[in-house]
Image (tube, rainbow, N blue to C red):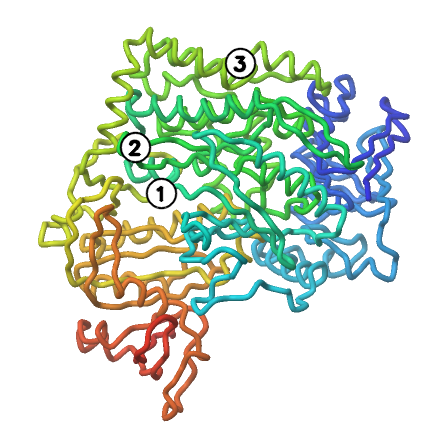
Amino acid sequence: MHVEISITAGPAKGQRFTFAKPDRFLFGRTLDARVSLPDDPYVSRQHFLLEISPPDCKITDLGSKNGTFVNGVRYGGRKPLRAGIQQAPRGIRETILKDGDKITVGDTQMNITIMSAPSKQNEKKNTVATLSYTPNDPVHQEQAPSSPTGLLGRLLKDAAEKKHPKAPLSKPPQNAHGFPEFEGYQIEEMIDRGGMGVVYKAITLKTGREVAIKVMHPHMAANPDNVSTFQREIDVTRQLTHHNIVQLFDHGKTDDLFYFVLEFVKGMNLYQFLEFRGGPLPLKEAASIMLDTLDGLAYAHQAKITMKIANGHEQSYIGIVHRDLKPQNILLGHSEKGWIAKISDFGISKSFESAGLTNITKPGEVLGTPMYWPREQITHYKYLNPATDVFSVAAVFYEMLTGRWVRDGFEELFERSQKQNRLASISDYMSVIVGNAAIPIRERNSNIPEAVANVIDRALLEVEVPYDERKMRDTLSQMRYPNARVFRNALETAFLESGLTEATMRKAQHDLGSQNKRFLRKAPSKKLSTQQKPQMKVDENLNGGVPASNGTIFYSTIRPSVTRSKEVTLLVLHLEESSEYIREVGDTYFSNTINNLYKRVRKHSSASELIFMKATGDGFLAVFTSMSAAFSIALSFLKKPIQVDIQVRMALHWGPVKIAHDGDVLGVEVHRVFRIGNVQMSEQIDAEYDGAPIPVSNRIVLTHQGLKHLNERDRAKFRYAGKYQLKGFEEGCGLWVLHKRQ
């Protein structure tokens, strides 16, 4: 399968492009466009973008003045429409291209050829989700979409049913706890969830070693060819062995799922750490994390690897590019020496893309995290090199030291999208990236030494580069740093010039890892506050200490060494069908949704009684001093949903919890409340109960222990829902439920 673009008229007539793998294609006047027409007055600087993942191809107008025509229909365009020309409905700037489609911009005409295109009788069955419309369709002509979000949801749902029919998927066997089973491993718990899959903590049965198992579901059907391509790609990643890179031990495929057995890192990712701290890190604390990360990245950029090519022969290469560096992909493991940084997800996303197992982005979905992208990640997608990683990791360091993203524009984009009730698209991100250069780091934080600032600012330089791999590589290598090793050496020299010695950095690293502090965490937001936060120990707060009075949320980074217990209220919130939701709207939009959950809790009038909170991948676990406070917050999610297209499941329970030596909130009752949050009617064991079934979503489920701690008025809002046999518990559990939004 491949996509072919032939230019049949205009200044670039005769050019032909063939795509057998995922790629992006920028058309415009700008120098770094794949087809650059600097002298064509009809063409905008960035006119349109093609996203290609054979056999699929999507075109998006990038806010051009004159619009982009597909088969005579104009998409986008700021200039008033001439009489007799059809316009796509307002707000729709993108459409999926089919075999034989024609694109017109001024004098330039392009033909689209999609090899192995579906036959006409199957074309309807294989339609791809998009905000597009059909010319002369009276529905689209007479009824402009009243709700972009509603239209988007309908199209995504229709497309999911057409492109991915809900035939029974083969799933791996599940154990008594509902976790998947993989030969040789025992799953213990889910530790993370994202747009591409779920991560579990597991034990290797032969050795007892703790591992992480990442389970991913391809967006595309897996055929023998792309499975073989994927296996060749991922085998390259297994060759990376460095203490600052998360080790890939094994991988496999079971029916429709791919799984990866990875080194288990006990700690948190950098995003969580920055959120826990509630603001940017001082340079002396950030320095060791920066150097650790660059050590791992430098090794990958210079590693000699061997790859089997399609004919079975082996070929050697030097270096691997990560392509998706962000705070979430830098894990901080804790040891006696302090934090050690490890880069995760090396090669997994790229291998999925290269094998054709991901699809082109749907509206609102973006593969990767654009806040850390240089412009070539869009314009030169095929030719990304180590200098691209240099920019991305420098953008991560920038955020560590300032609490801000490197560019202006993203905050405004998210706020604007929220007000317009729509999802940010790849074209929105591109407009921000190409229109906003990186802000010099000392303008964000004047305390950063000038020598260090100069190194980071250089790593963030960008320029329009012709679409030529050699020119791009040479230009970026000279302008930034050619790879992570050179960047690391320059940064270490700057540290020394600024009086930051290795001994100082290591002491700060040790102090950070060994101190027994309690950090206040601000609710997740796009900007991290630089305000100094008060501190409180977890054990003091859970054992009679006075909670904060300003409604902020507590987290722990390094935990108390003493295990204590106290009776508390436990609230668990899950997003219904979160994996499918992430797949539809994308990781970035999903992260903003989770942030809004936290913000709701932080600003609630009962938040002063919140004493602990932690993320669970698709929601949160919160600990309160009183049942009334927890219920009040839970009720707010029923009365006013966090988002119209999101449903939630909540559980409330009262019981004792323990603070382990590493500070986590543990105990049987924590396990129980999670089971209650996911309870289903199939688990009911009360033969005499003949009432209404327990709702699937938009519900609060409450235990008898929790019911006793509510006042009489609030108890009356719940109805008895029968007794249930919770997984992992011998005794039955009586439950009460509140479903109606009142």
Residue 387's place in the image compared with 657, above or below, is above
Q: Which amino acid is tagged 1?
A: Lys
Q: Is residue 436 visible?
A: no
- As rendered, which of 35 and 694 lies closer to the eye? 694
Residue 229 percent across, percent down from the top left? 71, 41
Q: Secondary structure at mark 1?
A: loop
Total tally of numbered discs in the picture = 3
Q: Residue at x 66, y 41 (%)?
A: 353
- C-alpha distance separating marks 1 and 2: 23 Å
Q: Which type of secondary structure does the marked residue at label 2 adopt?
A: loop
Can you identify the residue that label 1 sits on? Answer: 266
Q: Earlier in the sequence, mark 2 or mark 3?
A: 2
Q: Quarter of the image containing the N terminus?
A: top right
Figure check: 70 above or below 215? above
Which residue lies under the disc numbered 2? 279
- Give neighbour class at mark 1: few <14, some 14-19, many 20+ (Cα, 10 Å): few
Task: Give the mark toward the camera: 1 or 2.
Answer: 1
Q: Quadrant of residue 733?
A: bottom left
Q: Could you tell me how far apart the alpha carbons at marks 1 and 3 are, in whole angstroms?
A: 32 Å
Name the image quarter holding residue 340.
Answer: top left
Assess whether mark 3 and mark 1 are in contact (beta carbons under 8 angstroms). no
Q: Position of residue 324 (x, y in %)?
A: 54, 34
